[in-house]
Amino acid sequence: MNTVIAFIIIFGVLVFVHELGHLVFAKRAGILCREFAIGFGPKVFTFKKNETVYTIRLLPIGGFVRMAGEDPETIELKPGYHVGLLFNSAGEVNKVIVNNKEKFPEAKMLEVEHADLEKELVIRGFELSDEETLREYKVAEEAYFVMDGQEIQNAPYNRQFGSKTLWQRTMAIFAGPMMNFILAFVIFAFLGIVHGYPVNDAVIGQLTEDGAAQDAGLRQGDKVVAIDDSSVASWEELVSVIQANPNKELEFNITRDGESLSIPVTPKAETVEDKSIGIIGVYMPMEKSFLGSFPKAATETFNWSKEIVVGLGKLITGQFSLDMLSGPVGIYKSTEVVAESGVIMLMRWAAVLSINLGIINLLPIPALDGGRLMFFAAEAVRGKPVDRHKEGLVHFIGFALLMLLMLVVTWNDIQKFFL
């Protein structure tokens, strides 16, 4: 149950932060955002604030922000349609009743002759009580269609995604992955402040209870000057000497509280990848510093990003197998293992997953943020946008292929971990 809770929290936070980036920058650009959703499928929880409906959906495989002009909720009023009109205090149409008009006896009934609810914001037509006189009504900037008892906000062209500048659209899409990198940086910085960050000094960090270092009398904070009369200046050098000498007694020359000491330590042998290495049961030294945590967090975010990109590079070079990919099931099992090491490691795992999510979304694959950005780059080069229908078809095919890949990866994870 602890693993389930940890997985839900981590997944929820990563998706929430990602989609929040899209939402904030879209709203800053003046785009009408109809829905902010965590998950896909049937709605489990929903509430509305201002113009946006916030939902949690059943299937935990992502999330989305539905922006006006990018969704199918546009209602077209064609000539001959009969609609009901309700007006605000300024005399503008603020509600257009599409069906079930009998429930709105106070509405003015109109046969539509012409309607432009994007640019002109007008409806012209004949009142059913006076079919001889053509009348024109101004539509409010914030107006709603009422269909099947549900209100759907009309989106004038200036509130639609496609009306915004290339830069505004680019930032609305790029902001999602960007927020994942920012989240990772914040987590690493927080851990550095409250727990400390590793430093590359030849200093003994925390000791394990059953390790050779504890048995030999080493203490946390001891500075290792030399091993067997060979000087040691960094943590990497210290680890290298220890690993190269399993079951061999080593003379540690250390300084403790200003005093020089010599302590013999025999590393225990452990087999890693069919190779015997020495270990003494100590962790890398940690340092707490508020200001120092921020550059360390930036470095760690960069290093993990580079590591993930290098791993993805194997897709291109052919050094790839399906086992290198993990879906929700694989991530759940990894979370289960990491959770056993405590909250600190779980937070670090969340930061790494956040970086991974950001990088994956930046790949130039249709239906992902990177695919959208690829079309924006083409628009910048061509000087005009790619045909929306063609772009939509590409994204649809890309989404279908991604879902197929997700199913294959998930089945592979189930076989690997449960069968």
Image (tube, rainbow, N blue to C red):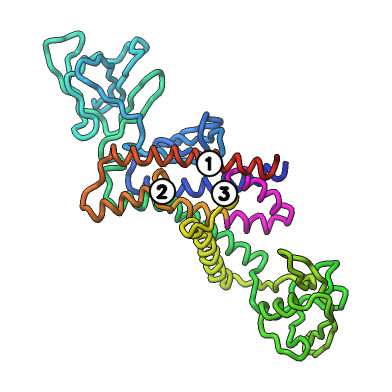
Q: Is residue 326 magenta?
A: yes
At label 3, the amino acid type is: Leu
Q: Residues within 10 Å of mark 3 (few under 14, many from 20)?
A: few
Q: Nearer the viewer, residue 237 or 209?
A: 237
Q: Mark yes or no: residue 182 visible.
A: no
Q: Are marks 2 and 1 in contact (CB under 8 Å)?
A: no
- Image coordinates of residue 329 in percent, x first then y, are 62, 43
On the image, numbered disc 3 is attached to which residue? 322
Q: Are marks 3 and 1 in contact (CB under 8 Å)?
A: no
Q: Nearer the viewer, residue 59 or 38?
A: 59
Label 2's element?
loop
On the image, numbered disc 1 is attached to which residue? 406
Write down the region rendered in magenta. 325-352
- The answer to which image quadrant residue 12 occupies is top right
Label 3's element?
helix
Quadrant including the C terminus: top right
Q: Mark yes or no: residue 176 visible.
A: yes
Name the residue: 76% across, 91% down: 229
Above or below 144: residue 329: below
Name the residue: 48% across, 49% down: 18
- First in sequence, mark 2 or 3: give its number: 3
At label 1, the amino acid type is: Met
Q: Residues within 10 Å of mark 1 (few under 14, many from 20)?
A: some
On the image, numbered disc 2 is attached to which residue? 365
- Image coordinates of residue 362 in percent, x first then y, are 43, 53
CA distance separating discs 3 and 1:
11 Å
